[in-house]
Image (cartoon, rainbow, N blue to C red):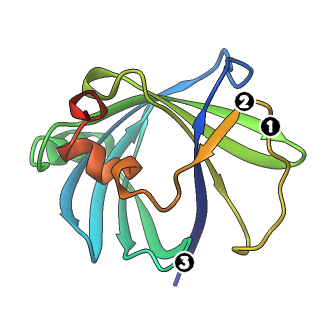
Amino acid sequence: MAIEIERKFLVVGEGWRQPDAMHLSQGYLNRDPARTVRVRIAGEEAFLTIKGRSEGLSRAEFEYPLPLADAQALLALCDGPLVEKHRHRVMVDGLLWEVDEFHGANAGLVVAELELQSEDQPFTRPAWLGEEVSDDARYFNSQLASRPFNTWP
């Protein structure tokens, strides 16, 4: 079984921007708290991802490639609006940060994610890293599909 260990932070400043950001479109076939099933198109590639319930910073994650045409058809079946964003990949001291700049109903939200090998793995905090939101479910992409950032009080 694959385990994802991820920390998530709000982003401040502009030092994270990369010129070669990739556009992602994703939707959810299931957003149950015990499991989410996501379809994502990333450039010309597509994936089906199943994630289990978070336990601390860890959760089960399974990801499988999909034919692009199948992913486009599945996105039409998704529950709620799609999540649209540009992903910037930023290396900091040998670790890959994925900085997501959201669009549409989530415009204005910028979140950085870091996948780790263990929950206590040390890492360098870049200057553009803001508040940690790893435990705040509002920032889960599955929640942003049903309760977009621009609807928050």
Q: CA distance from mark 1 to mark 3?
A: 27 Å
- Give me the C-alpha separation between circle 2 and circle 3: 30 Å
Front tag of 2 and 3: 2
Please give the name of the residue rendered at 83% of the width and 55% of the height, measured from the top-left corner. 123
Question: Which sits in the foreground, 48 or 17?
Answer: 17
In the visual, does 133 lie left or right of 32? right
Which numbered circle lies on residue 126? 1
Residues marked 2 and 3 touching at CB (< 8 Å)? no
Q: What kind of residue is marked 3? A: Ala
Residue shown at 69%/73% (left/top)?
A: 119
In the rendered structure, which amino acid carries the disc numbered 1?
Pro
Mark 2: few/some/many CA within 10 Å (<14, 14-19, 20+): some
Q: Kindly identify which numbered label has been placed on residue 67.
A: none
Q: Which residue is mark 2?
A: 128
Q: Residue at x 38, y 52 (%)?
A: 140
Other residues around mark 3 within 10 Å, as few (<14) / some (14–19) / many (≥20): few
Mark closest to the chain's N terminus, 2 or 3:
3
Q: Nearer the viewer, residue 8 or 51?
A: 8
In the image shown, does 122 or 39 lie closer to the viewer?
122
Disc marking residue 2: 3
Q: In the rendered structure, are the residues bearing label 1 and label 3 in contact, judged by CB atoms less than 8 Å apart? A: no
Give the secondary structure at mark 1. Answer: loop
Helix, strand, or loop for circle 3? loop
Q: Can you give x and y, in whole percent of width and height, for residue 138 in the image?
A: 34, 50
Drawn side of residue 139 relative to residue 110, left or right: left
Image depth: mark 1 or mark 3 in front: 1
Q: Residue 2, position in %: x, y?
A: 54, 77
Q: Could you tell me how many numbered marks the image carries?
A: 3
Amino acid type for the residue under numbered disc 2: Trp
Q: Mark 2 and mark 1: span between their CA atoms?
A: 5 Å
Q: Is residue 21 left or right of residue 153?
A: right
